Image: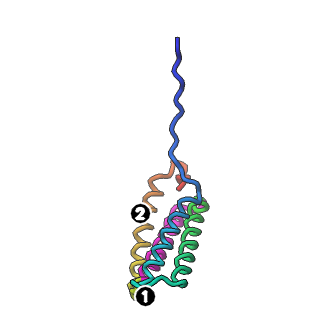
């Protein structure tokens, strides 16, 4: 009598810890360099702006994905909101918007992301209060 081989359980696909922040950082840096051109030619300064923007955002995302699990859910949500709001406000300021409107958009995005992440963290922790690994 032939027995069927056991099929291993499928685990969710997880990207390596540095791949996703690096990809998001590169896309962000390319977008920052493109927005700062204002329709003109690309200069070395704009390339440096894109490179530095990419490195800073990728580093912030890597740090959040790696070390934020030790923070309580409120501070984790605020950290994600701060990174998102700062990144959004910075890109909007590169388009030529005023400091007030860039700050307003950044604060609005930070508040929305903080609320959303707090809801996610609050609803996905186990009964002992341990957070899900985000």
Residue situated furthest front in the rendering: 41
Give residue 130's mark.
none
Q: CA distance from mark 2 to mark 1?
A: 26 Å
The reply to whether dot 2 and dot 1 touch (C-beta < 8 Å) is: no
The secondary structure that most of the magenta stretch takes on is: helix
Relative height, residue 94 to residue 14 (above, below)? below
- Identify the residue at horizontal 59%, vertical 69% (top origin): 59
Relative height, residue 28 to residue 35 (above, below)? above
Q: Could you tell me if residue 93 is visible in this image? A: no
Q: Which residues are magenta?
A: 70-94
Q: Which residue is mark 1?
A: 99
- Identify the residue at horizontal 43%, vertical 67% (top origin): 113
How many callouts does the rendering have? 2
Instruction: Say which of 58 and 121 sits in front.
Output: 58
Q: Mark 1 or mark 2, which is nearer the start of the sequence?
A: 1
- Identify the residue at horizontal 53%, vertical 50% (top origin): 14
Q: Could you tell me if residue 47 is visible in this image? A: yes
Instruction: Say which of 9 and 4 sits in front.
Output: 4
């Amino acid at each position: 009598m032939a027995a069927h081989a056991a099929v291993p359980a499928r685990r969710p696909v997880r990207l390596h810890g540095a791949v996703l922040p690096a990809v998001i950082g590169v896309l962000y840096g390319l977008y920052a360099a493109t927005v700062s051109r204002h329709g003109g030619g690309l200069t070395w300064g704009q390339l440096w702006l894109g490179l530095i923007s990419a490195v800073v955002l990728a580093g912030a995302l890597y740090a959040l994905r790696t070390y934020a699990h030790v923070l309580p859910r409120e501070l984790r949500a605020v950290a994600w909101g701060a990174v998102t709001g700062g990144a959004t406000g910075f890109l909007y300021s590169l388009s030529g918007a005023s400091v007030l409107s860039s700050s307003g958009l950044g604060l609005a995005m930070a508040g929305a992301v903080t609320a959303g992440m707090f809801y996610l963290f609050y609803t996905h922790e186990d009964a002992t209060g341990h957070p899900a690994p985000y």
